[in-house]
Image: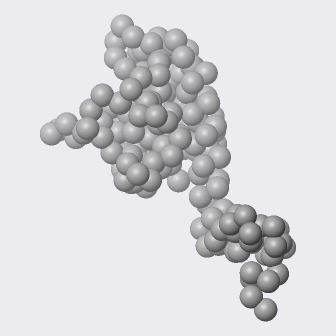
Amino acid sequence: MSARTTMSPLLVRAGLVSAVALATVGGTLVVPGASADAEAASSSAAALRIAASKKGSPYKYGATGPYRFDCSGLTLYSFKRAGKRLPRTAAAQYNRTRHLSASARRLGDLVFFHSRRGVYHVGIYAGNGKIWHAPKPGTVVRLERIWSRSVSYGRVR
């Protein structure tokens, strides 16, 4: 008996059967690595919400919250509150993430800014080409459009 004949005819006609639906057996997902991806997505979404909740918090070099932040301090704080550990600096965070293409990025992934000298800034991807970040002295945590093409993306594991 094929998977098609055991599924609801309505789902099949509507074209709503996906590989994930086919891989689900008795409510248990049997796709290798899927639970790790779901956990990462949940943590990333939580970290994104936490970073957004810090809107307006002043920038302070070396600060890791909860009231003042630098760029990597905001990402460290947000992911720590979401249950994930990150190193202190943007460059160390880059080295700890799973690197992604721009087309594979999701909400809550980290966005790393590069120069010839290496990674110099990090923020949390908020969708539509924007990030939550703590930009520089004299500014506050804010949502801002990604301003450079010299970026890469990383997913916190």
Colouring scheme, one of rainbow, by chain, secondary structure, one colour? one colour
Q: Can residue 138 be seen by looking at this rendering?
A: yes
As drawn, 98 above or below 93: below
Query: How far from the left and from the top, in percent, is residue 8?
Result: 83, 72
Classify residue 62 as left or right of residue 52.
Answer: left
How many numbered circles does the render carry? 0
Residue displayed at 61% across by 28% down? 50
Q: Residue furthest bottom?
A: 1
Q: Nearer the viewer, residue 140 or 84?
A: 140
Residue 76 position within the rendered picture, expressed as x and y whole percent measured from the top left? 50, 34
> Is residue 30 something that shows in the picture?
no
- Residue at 77% x, 67% y: name it: 11
Q: Is residue 40 left or right of residue 95?
A: right
Q: Residue furthest left?
A: 116
Q: Which residue is drawn at the image coordinates 74% and 81% (left, top)?
A: 4
Using the rendered view, name the quadrant where residue 6 is placed.
bottom right
Residue 41: image x %, image y %?
Answer: 60, 49
Residue pushed farthest top? 138
Task: Work out whether 94 lies above or below 7.
Answer: above
- Residue at 35% x, 39% y: name it: 112
Position of the N terminus, as image quadrant, is bottom right
Position above or below: 156 against 56: below
User: Residue 39 or 95: which is nearer the viewer?
Assistant: 39
Query: Is residue 147 found left or right of 125 in the rendered image?
Result: left
Horizontal side of 98 relative to 53 (left or right) equals left
Which percent across, then down, holds residue 98?
43, 55
Q: Quadrant of residue 24?
A: bottom right
| Foreground of the two, 101 or 95 | 101
